[in-house]
Image (cartoon, grey):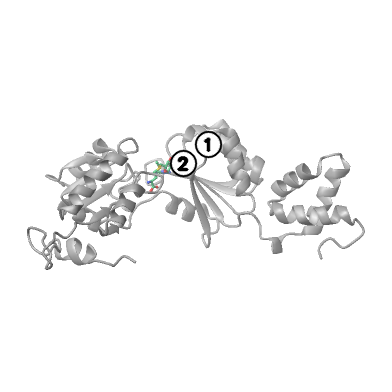
Amino acid sequence: MSRRRPSSAEGIGSSGSPKRQDPAGENPEGGISPGRLFVCPTPIGNLEDITIRTLKVLRRVDLIAAEDTRKVKVLLERYRVRRVPVVSYHRHNEEQRVGYILEYLRRGRDVALLSEAGTPGISDPGERAVRAAIREGIPVEALPGPTAFVPALVVSGLSTRRFAFEGFLPRQAGARRKYLESLADEERTLVFYEAPHRLQETLADLLAVLGDRQAAVARELTKLHEEVLRGSVSELLDHFTVNPPRGEVVVVIEGCRPPEDVDWEQVLREVKRQREAGVPFSEAVRRVAAEAGVPRRELYRLALKAEAAPDSEPLR
Ligand code: SAM
């Protein structure tokens, strides 16, 4: 198990001076103590959304590794963070950059890791550097701060008690649908990141696979044109078909209804009706589960039982 070291609140953050053992970074045992890797969230739109602690850390680290160096320079200029070298750290140079960052850390220097927006490691590069640092026993501190999925979930009006953050769905239609199928019985609220030009397709797939559940699309959070639309998936799809979205979006959709909240008699009647109309068994279950927003596996089990013994009580 890794041990906790002084946090930035005790070191860089509050006292103002990094807690290294001596100026050369030597510890009492004679070796050089490693520096710290600070994972720093940055604004997702509104430049004021950065914490005082993050700014303190940015002013005092020895290196800033940023996904988008141009964007970060605007932020650093705004807060007069100067003289700290900035290097790029993105998907295409991540592996090689991790080695470079580790070299800094091993020499007792502190490094701040930033993504293009929001929290590094959340649908953004960061995970590799964090894992590599942990492997070497280098202290890692993730500072709290902006990330898009939390405000989107909170403002959606859907249940925040339990939720599953799913990041981006697969881009290919087949893979996306298959992935959504695997979420059909998920009772927690689901949160997805999506690109604006794929929103319509995604809403159409959500409708087809998960049914016409309640959902919300949070667009341009923290920005001038922030907008949150709430309604059923089909209503949202209609809206965005007429008004193609611009900017960044998060999609939040309610989870599947828990089995105990379902009127199974009624749902099974609908399966029976579809079967009598000639719909194959699995297809009838899939359709009815999506339309009624009920757990498919449970419906499958009950419908199978009902077909096997039509005169028995299906819910026992
Ligand atoms: N690391 C970021 C975070 O912590 O949220 C996420 C980066 S990911 C590459 C970008 C996605 O986040 C966008 O496609 C969108 O789904 C979501 N996003 C980022 N900023 C947003 C904003 N201001 N409003 C709505 N969604 C946003």
Residue 193: % across, % down? 47, 43
Residue 9: % across, % down? 22, 65
Residue indicated by mark 1: 199
Where in the image, quadrant-wise, is ligand 1 located?
top left
Q: Secondary structure at mark 2?
A: strand
Q: Quadrant of the C terminus?
A: bottom right
Residue 239 visible: no
Q: Which mark is residue 249?
A: 2
Question: Would residue 257 appear left or right of 199 to someone viewing this image?
Answer: right
Question: Which residue is nearer to you in this view: 232 or 91?
Answer: 91
Q: Amino acid at mark 2?
A: Val
Q: Residue at x 86, y 52 (%)?
A: 307
Residue 112 visible: yes
Q: Amino acid at mark 1?
A: Leu
Question: Which residue is nearer to you in this view: 103 or 248?
Answer: 103
Is disc 2's CB within 8 Å of ligand 1? yes
Question: Disc 2, disc 1: CB below 8 Å?
Answer: yes
13 versus 243 height, above or below: below
Residue 196: % across, % down? 47, 35
Callout 2 environment at 10 Å: few (<14), some (14 to 19), or many (20+)? many
